[in-house]
Image (spheres, rainbow, N blue to C red):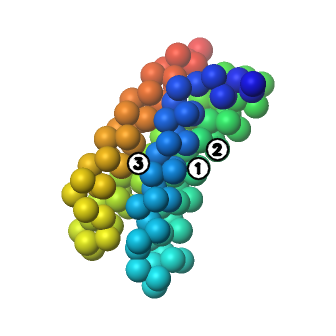
Amino acid sequence: MLNFEKLDVWHKSIALATAVYDVTKRFPADERFGLTNQMRRAAVSISSNIAEGCSRGSKPDFRRFIEIATGSAFEVVSQARIAQQQDMLTTFEHERVYQSALEIVRMLCGLRDSLAD
């Protein structure tokens, strides 16, 4: 098992990406290269940056990747709101994505703070 696989926040970010893929399957075809792609890429970026950060040799480097992962989580929140306002996400789906992203952001902030010099 690799170090990042031991992190609860990594597992939760994988679950969020899976949820984003599930809800975006129903987005209109003309959004395939727009909001669908953007939301999926941002969601996948969270776990990817956590994993890449774990491969770095220093706390400051790892911390920077955690900050990037946090930014990607905020992107998912913003994109989910747009999708909801465009009637592509139900209120329930939006809330599920929002709450999951919020939990991940809190966990990432805690992890980032633990890496402070």
For disc 1, the neighbor class at 10 Å (few under 14, some 14 to 19, many from 20) is many
66 vs 81, nearest the viewer: 81
Badge 3 marks a residue whose secondary structure is helix
Q: Quadrant of residue 41?
A: bottom right
The amino acid type, in three-letter code, at marker 3 is: Phe
Q: What amino acid is labelled 1 in the image?
A: Ser
- Residue 17 falls left or right of residue 86: right
Instruction: Answer whether labels 3 and 2 touch (C-beta < 8 Å).
Output: no
In which quadrant will I find the N terminus?
Answer: top right
Residue type, numbered disc 2: Ser
Whichever of callouts 3 and 2 sits on the residue coming sooner in the sequence is 2
Where is residue 7 shown, x and y percent of the image? 58, 25
Pointer 3 or 1: first along the chain: 1
Is label 1 in a helix, a strand or a loop? helix
Residue 107, quarter of the rendered image:
top left
Query: Where residue 65 sits: x, y (%)?
Result: 61, 37
Q: Residue at x 26, y 49 (%)?
A: 95
Q: Nearer the viewer, residue 104 or 1?
A: 1
Measured Cα–Cα span from mark 3 to mark 1: 11 Å
- Pointer 3: what residue? 74
Task: Kindly check if marks 1 and 2 are in contact, taking CB atoms under 8 A apart as contact.
Answer: yes
Which x, y percent locates residue 108?
48, 30
Identify residue for label 1: 45
Q: Which mark is residue 48?
A: 2
In this rendering, is residue 93 above or below 99? below
Q: Nearer the viewer, residue 22 or 49?
A: 22
**For the residues marked 1 and 2, what is the alpha-carbon distance in whole angstroms?**
5 Å
Nearer to me, 84 or 59: 84
Q: Would you say residue 75 is visible in this rendering? A: no
**In the image: residue 74, left or right of residue 53:** left
